[in-house]
Amino acid sequence: MKDVVAKWRASLGLRIMSVAFVGVHIPLLVFTGWLLSASHGALDALLMPLLVVLLATLAGTGLTLWMIHRLLAPLREAADELERYCERPLPLPPGGHDEIDQLLRRLRHGLRSMRAGMRKLTHEATRDALTGALNRRGAQQAMSASAALALSQSVPFCVAVLDLDDLKPINDQFGHAAGDAVLLAMVERMRGRLGGQDWIGRWGGDEFVVGLHLPLEAAVALLEALLHELRSGDTPVRLSAGVAQWRPGEDSDALYKRADQLMYRVKFSGGGRLLHAS
């Protein structure tokens, strides 16, 4: 969009000059041609009137261009704001009631709609359609942001990888709708325990990743309580979980791999419990 605005501004002056020339000089040329044809060669008597008309035309052209320049000032201001908006959202100048102001109002409305659409697209691109948790891309972004926060503010951060042990038997016995209900219930129970900066993402299938800005002991206690709650529900669900605490200088991929390896150790040893590592 920024390139479009720049090209439009570059061609605006040329188009205004063309309109002014056609509007002012075409009548002059027609009048001069008619006068010459009617004079039957008596050019000396016409020089002074033609000179006066020419000077008046040039003055009128200059005045016309100046007035157009003034009239288009709000539009130029809007173009400036639109260029800056392409880099970061800024309010456009308020409008009045003439044609240009109506254009500005419509432009503001269009930009607001575009921002709302972009927010919706961004949200949908990072959310799991079934559970409303972050999808894999969203979880990767959140994990990187949480690791950066832990580094910059020296706050604790742990990543947990959770895998449902009993989802396939539930799907086979009760149908996929029942399995989906289990996933939704697990996410909702987890959300009820998350802090303001914490998050949960669906990594794929029945595997979830949770980011907790807590010390390792507190993160383990929170997740142990979740595992116990799920085992004790109307539809008992067992989870295999691995929790790893972020280490200074560690990137998010390495942190996830450590938690994932712990989860698989639990999975292959029978599941239904949690392993952790600092």
Image: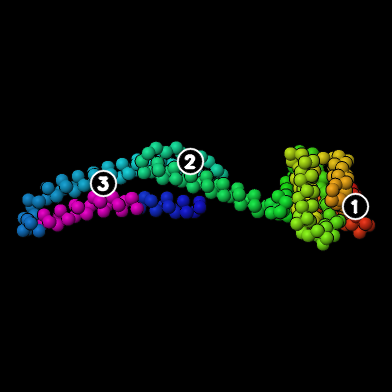
Looking at the image, the residue that sits furthest to the bottom is: 172
Q: Secondary structure at mark 2?
A: loop
The residue positioned 53% from the left and 41% from the top of the image is 90
**Bounds of the magenta span?**
15-36
Q: Secondary structure at mark 1?
A: loop
Looking at the image, the residue that sits furthest to the right is: 269
Report the amino acid beneath label 1.
Gly
Dot 3 alpha-carbon crowd within 10 angstroms: few under 14, some 14 to 19, many 20 or more = some
Q: CA distance from mark 3 to mark 2?
A: 31 Å
The residue positioned 61% from the left and 52% from the top of the image is 121
Please name the residue that numbered disc 2 is placed on. Answer: 92
Q: Is residue 33 magenta?
A: yes
Report the amino acid beneath label 2.
Leu
Please name the residue that numbered disc 3 is placed on. Answer: 61
Q: Is residue 270 magenta?
A: no
First-in-chain label (3 vs 1):
3
Please name the residue that numbered disc 1 is placed on. Answer: 272
Q: Secondary structure at mark 3?
A: helix
- Tally of marks: 3
